Amino acid sequence: MNGESRAARWPVFVALALLVLITVIFIIEFVLTTESELAAPTPVVLAADTYQATVAALLADADPANGAQWVEKYNCIACHRAGAENKIAPPFAGVADRASTRRPPLTASAYIYESITQPAAFVVDGFTPAMPQNYPDLLMEQELGDIIAYLLTPDAH
């Protein structure tokens, strides 16, 4: 083999080495990402006081009338009012009564809080997990408190 032939192969070897390196990195990243995504979140051990301190603080200055406006603004009604007929989400009507027994030992207010902030934690039988996961990022604390207060009233619909 002459020197020119070896020199011509050098870029091919470098390209192959880079391709192998990129492939190995991709496989490692894909496997690690997939494993972390598949890892089940640690379930919350429920107690009668779970979320109660947070919920009490949210409800301290909450205004149910404002909560009625927030569920309209954030379009919660699309699934919980209109979509409830098609089993997209449970209806707001009667939610306070159902919430008190839906996920023992949580109180109604704690259940509603969890349903908004961690909707995948519990999905009501007969419904799909369609609730957006980003409400904790969208809602201000006052808005969240107002919504919980509204849903605890008999006027929620």
Image (tube, grey):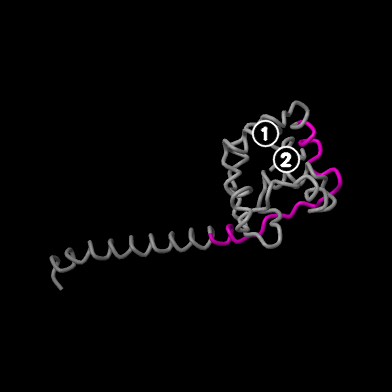
| Image vertical order of residue 155 relative to residue 132, above or below | above
| 36 with respect to 54 (left or right) | left
Query: In x, y percent, where is residue 52?
Result: 81, 39
Front in this rendered view, residue 49 or 21: 49
Taking the spot 85% from the left edge, 51% from the top edge, the residue there is 105
Q: What element carries label 2?
A: helix
Taking the spot 81% from the left edge, 51% from the top edge, the residue there is 46
Query: In x, y percent, where is residue 18?
Result: 33, 60
List the single residue furthest toward the bottom: 1
Amino acid at dot 1: Gly
Query: In x, y percent, where is residue 26?
Result: 43, 60
| Label placed on residue 94 | none
Measure the alpha-carbon separation of dots 2 and 1.
8 Å
> Which quadrant of the view contains residue 20?
bottom left
Check disc 1 and report the residue beneath it: 67
Q: Quadrant of the C terminus?
A: top right
Taking the spot 38% from the left edge, 60% from the top edge, the residue there is 22
Q: Which label's residue is closer to the chain start, 2 or 1? A: 1
| Image vertical order of residue 40 relative to residue 150, above or below | below
Q: Residues within 10 Å of mark 1 (few under 14, many from 20)?
A: many
Q: Is mark 1 on a helix, strand or loop?
A: helix
Check disc 2 and report the residue beneath it: 151
Q: Quadrant of the N terminus?
A: bottom left
In contact (CB < 8 Å): disc 2 and disc 1: yes
- Tell me where the magenta segment starts and ends, as one range: 34-57
Front in this rendered view, residue 9 or 125: 125
Q: Residues within 10 Å of mark 2 (few under 14, many from 20)?
A: many
Amino acid at dot 2: Leu
